[in-house]
Each structure stands twice: as structure tokens, then as C-alpha cells.
Image: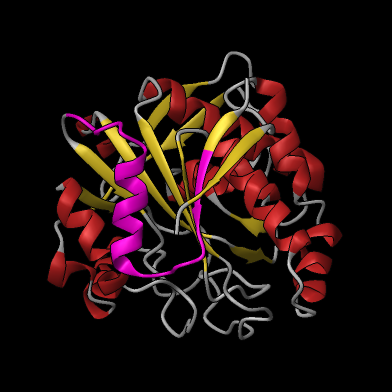
Amino acid sequence: MNSIVYFSKTITPEKVLELYQRLETPLKGNIAIKLHSGEVGNQNFLKPEFFKPVIDAVGGTVVECNTAYDGERNTTEKHFETLKKHGWSKYFQVDLLDSEGPDFELSIPNGKIIQKNFVGKDLVNYDSMLVLSHFKGHPMGGYGGAIKQLSIGVASSYGKAYIHGIGTPENFWSADHDSFLEAMADAASSVIDYLKGNILYINVMKNMSVDCDCCAVAEDPCMKDIGILASLDPIAIDQACLDLVYAADDPGKKHLIERIESLNGVHTIEAAAALGYGSRSYNLITID
């Protein structure tokens, strides 16, 4: 059975809220809103004002985790300062899930590469999650979307290194690449299982650089904005984004596709589909 993915070419804060409402699946209990806080110096990340209508409507807490590499978000003190500098703290309640240890360990009994995932311990305070992803390229994953937000995004600083190193954090930069992509798919499954599937996904195809929002020095966007997507299925929404890039008539897509293909980015989707927590088959419903 195909998953439903809603799509609009209109990219506005109000349209983000409208597509969330189209899902007709209100999030309940304490709601975590996972997004990317943006590395200091990055010009492409999506700002608080863009997501404000949907976050206000949902009424949740913006959550993030510390990074596993040098920068302005790799310690709790610096990350809170970045959240303040970028305006997240001005508008919303914020929570660094791994601001204090120890990490919360999730089991992945069916994981192909890793059988456990280390996430920020504050995840236990939430019952559901809205995943707001900025779809773009990525210098390690090929692309960044919903699956990456669930895996690397929710993982603690240690957990990020654990996924990158396919179970051996010391191998952060040297692990087998396809195994790393498969480990991301494994980690994402553990968050879905923990929250019992009470997760909604929105991907925004805007400011699409080949680089991630984690890059302090990132390339400018290489192709025109495409739109906003919303789904209950993280695999379908990421697959739909890839398909829209390939189908675009923008010549700039060649640069983004080169980044995605050079790092076998689609393999994350393939690995996730093999684990069975979503489908690569979808019906795209366009909203004016």
C-alpha cells in the first residue's frame, strides 16, 4: 500500500502549518519538535520565523542534540548560546536532549549494522515528535532529510559518533561508508519504535545546497527551491524529495545529484525500507 505524501510548491510559514494539518493526525502528550538549529556561520538553515506558525500550533518543545565534531554546537554551553543567537530560544521552549548525561540507550534487535542507539536522555520526557527537516545535500550522507533527523539528529553527541563509526566511535571518519548509511537507518528505527510511531514529518526543499546546515562554511544553494512535503512515513517523504530533484528542470540539479550519488545517498532509504518502517512507494498529493 502506497504511503501518502502531501506536496506544495508554495514555500511559506503558513503552508508548513497547512500541510501539517492535512495529515489529520494530531500529536499528543509532550511533543518534541526536532529541527536543525544551524551551525554558526551557515547561511542556508531555516530560521525560527519560518517554522513559528506550525510550532505555535503544535505547542511542543524544540529539541536538539549536541554535535560530535568541533564547532559552536558540540558542548551544551555553546549549543545553548547558538540556540539563543539564532533566535530559537526567543520564540520557543528549547531542550538539548543530551545536555546532561548519561545517554539513554535504545535497543535495535533487528538492526543490520548496530543493535543499540544512544540518544539524549531527555527523550524519555516526550510522547510524540514533529520532525521538521531541511532537505539538502550532505557531505557525508549525500543528502539530509527525515531519516537523518531521526538518526543522527536525535542521537547524543556520543551516539552520533557511534553511528558514524558503525559501533566504534573511534572510527568516526574511517568506517565503511555504506555500513554508516545502514547504521543511520537502524538508528532511525529505534526512535520510531520508542515513540510507537507517533511521529509526523515535514521536509522543506528550500535553500538546497550540496552542504548540510552543520557546515559553518557551506556552498550557496545550487538549484531553485522546490516546495514543502508532509507525510506520516519518513521513507516515503525522503524518496519523494529525491524524485522531485531528479524530475526538476533546473540545470543546477546536476550538482546536487552528483553529491547525492557520489555518496550513495539513496542507500539510506534502501536500508530503511528493508527494515520495514515505511515504504518507497507513495502517492504524491499536490496542494495549491
Q: Is residue 222 visible?
A: yes
Q: Residue furthest top?
A: 109
- Tell me, what colour scheme is on the image? secondary structure
Q: Is residue 53 left or right of residue 157?
A: left
Q: Is residue 2 magenta?
A: no
Q: Which residues are magenta?
A: 5-28
Residue sitting nearer the eye, 208 or 68: 208
> Which residue sits at x=51%, y=58%?
68
> Which residue sits at x=68%, y=73%?
210
Q: Residue furthest front?
A: 288
Q: Is residue 32 left or right of residue 89?
A: right
User: Residue 21 appears at what percent x and percent y?
Assistant: 29, 44
Q: Is residue 12 magenta?
A: yes
> Which residue sits at x=70%, y=54%?
242
Residue sitting nearer the eye, 183 or 240: 240
Total tally of numbered discs in the picture = 0
User: Residue 67 appears at what percent x and percent y?
Assistant: 46, 59
Q: Is residue 201 above or below residue 77?
A: above
Residue sitting nearer the eye, 207 or 167: 207
Q: Quadrant of the N terminus?
A: top right
Q: Is residue 253 left or right of residue 52?
A: right
Q: Is residue 169 visible?
A: no
> Which residue sits at x=67%, y=44%?
239
Q: Is residue 72 above or below residue 239?
A: below
User: Residue 284 appears at what percent x and percent y?
Assistant: 59, 43
User: Residue 77 appears at what percent x and percent y?
Assistant: 26, 67
Q: Quadrant of the C terminus?
A: bottom left
